Structure formats: structure tokens, C-alpha cells
Amino acid sequence: MATIHPLTLFYDGRCAVCTLEMDHLRERCREGQLVFVDIAAADFDAAQVDATPARLQAEIHGLRADGELIRGLQVLRLAYAAAGIGWVLAPTGWWPLRLLSDVAYRLFARHRRTISRAARPLIDLLHAARARRMARRIRACHAGRCDVNGRPS
């Protein structure tokens, strides 16, 4: 079996929905299975993954530990599995849902910035809730009540 982890995720940091999703995965996955690379960052060079900027902007890409570059919903399925929540996207891999899910994802990817602008108020609420949750965790850890992963025990 090919080596998947660490799985490097190449995402668009200018997309609020994409960033929210990567933050969600980052929060859940603390064992080093996922590496996050913002392709919108000024210092990002698409040549490091032998891809064009346009190709990487078209949809999410992932680089498996074995060097295979993958794209689309397959990347998110593997990332969710690495974060321990693979069951959320598992149905998107089942026939005939896979075809419909892949088409829906490509449609989202094409219009993600417009969707992000429209969803901005909701995204801001979700970011605020995450910040409050993280602040509670930090306070609990400073009080000496957290496990080795920094989660309140």
C-alpha cells in the first residue's frame, strides 16, 4: 500500500471557506499527518510540486508522502480520515454518490471565492466560536487540566 501520510494540502488562503476548513482540520489533526500549504502566500512556488499556479488554483491538491499528487475531493477524503473524521466524507466515495460529489466539489471550487463572500457573516461567527473554544482550552491547560494533546481533560 502506498504511503499517504504526511499528506500535504495545497489550499487557497484567499478563500474564506477553504481557510475555515483547513483550520478545522488543523485543529483536529495534531499528530503530523497533515501539512498545510497556502498557495496564495507570497512566497509559495508552484514549481516545488511540479504544477502550475492555475492548476493548483482550480481545486485543492494534495501531495502524498510517496510523492503522488492528487486533487479534488479525494484529497479531502484522505485529510478527513487523517483527522479522525473520515466518516463525514466517506459517503462521497460511494457509487453513485462519488460522481455527484465530485461534480459538486468542482462546481464549488470554481465559485469558492463568490461563495466565501456570500457566506462571510457565517464564517466570521464560526471563527469567533473557534477562538472562544481555543481560549477555553488554553485557560484549562494553564490551570493544569489538559492532556498531552492540549485538550482539556
Image (tube, helix red, strand yellow):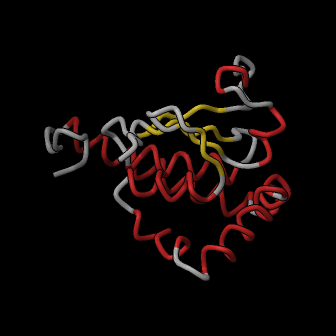
**What is the x, y in percent for residue 133?**
40, 52
Residue 99 to residue 131: above or below: below
Does residue 144 appear to the left or right of 34 in the view shown? left
Does residue 104 appear to the left or right of 73 in the view shown? right
The residue at 41%/42% (across/down) is 4
The residue at 22%/49% (across/down) is 152
Front-most of 123 and 84? 84
The residue at 65%/32% (across/down) is 38
Does residue 25 appear to the left or right of 70 in the view shown? left
Does residue 76 appear to the left or right of 111 in the view shown? left
In the picture as drawn, the residue positioned furthest to the front comes out as: 1
Front-most of 100 and 137? 100
Residue 65 picture quarter: top left
In the picture as drawn, the residue positioned furthest to the top comes out as: 43
Residue 62 to residue 97: above or below: above
**What is the x, y in percent for residue 153?**
15, 52
The residue at 68%/67% (across/down) is 102
In the picture as drawn, the residue positioned furthest to the bottom comes out as: 96
Residue 136 to residue 103: above or below: above
